[in-house]
């Protein structure tokens, strides 16, 4: 029998174990990287009224930005703007837009146009502005279950 040298498993070096302190504990609590604020401002175009997000947008037009390399995923740009300017978002609250006198702009991240509300207030605000999606259409068995009563 041959005597092969023992192999050591591949180990990635972890940054977490080095005692690094995040410059902003609120952003750290949301898993946002140390250079998040710097990356955030690269995608902002300040106009007279709204601050427009020029980076990635989702299907509804809301800006989004990567959290960073530590925590995968995206965070909506208007929520990130709230975190940067005002701090923590209370549990159960949404960040809503109010870009009046113009129609609300999903890409706006101006902190003066943002406010906190509940999910119910968010839905009422969207309905008032005509921004709610139409109700889903049912087909097949689901349609008969609802309409054959």
Image: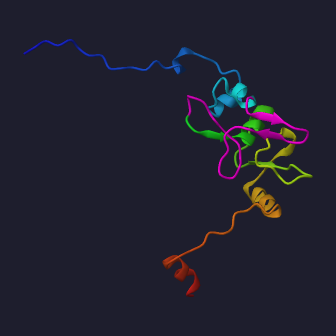
Return the x and y of residue 105 as percentages of the image width and height.
80, 49
93 to 31, vertically: above or below? below
Q: Which of 33 and 99 is in front in this view?
A: 99
Q: Give the number of marks.
A: 0
| Residue under the point 76% across and 32% down | 84
Q: Is residue 140 above or below residue 39?
A: below
**Can residue 117 be seen by looking at this rendering?**
yes
**Position of 9 compared to 128: left or right?**
left
Judging from the image, the colouring scheme is rainbow
Residue under the image location 86 percent in, 49 percent down: 99
* Residue in front for this viewpoint, 118 or 44: 44
Q: From which residue to which does the magenta span run?
A: 42-71
Relative to 137, residue 106 above or below: above
Q: Quadrant of the C terminus?
A: bottom right
Residue 13 in magenta stretch: no
Q: Quadrant of residue 89?
A: top right
Please provide percent x and percent y for residue 66. 62, 35
């Amino acid at each position: 029998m041959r005597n092969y040298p023992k192999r050591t498993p591949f180990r990635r070096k972890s940054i977490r174990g080095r005692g690094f302190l995040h410059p902003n504990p609120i952003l750290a609590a949301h898993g946002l990287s140390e250079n998040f604020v710097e990356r955030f401002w690269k995608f902002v175009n300040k106009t007279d009224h709204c601050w427009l997000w020029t980076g990635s947008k989702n299907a509804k037009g809301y800006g989004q930005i990567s959290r960073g390399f530590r925590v995968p995923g995206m965070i909506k740009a208007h929520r990130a703007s709230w975190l940067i300017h005002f701090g923590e978002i209370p549990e159960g609250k949404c960040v809503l837009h109010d870009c009046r006198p113009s129609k609300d702009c999903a890409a706006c991240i101006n902190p003066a146009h943002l406010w906190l509300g509940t999910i119910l207030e968010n839905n009422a605000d969207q309905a008032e502005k005509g921004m709610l999606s139409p109700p889903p259409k049912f087909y097949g068995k689901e349609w008969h279950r609802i309409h054959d009563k």
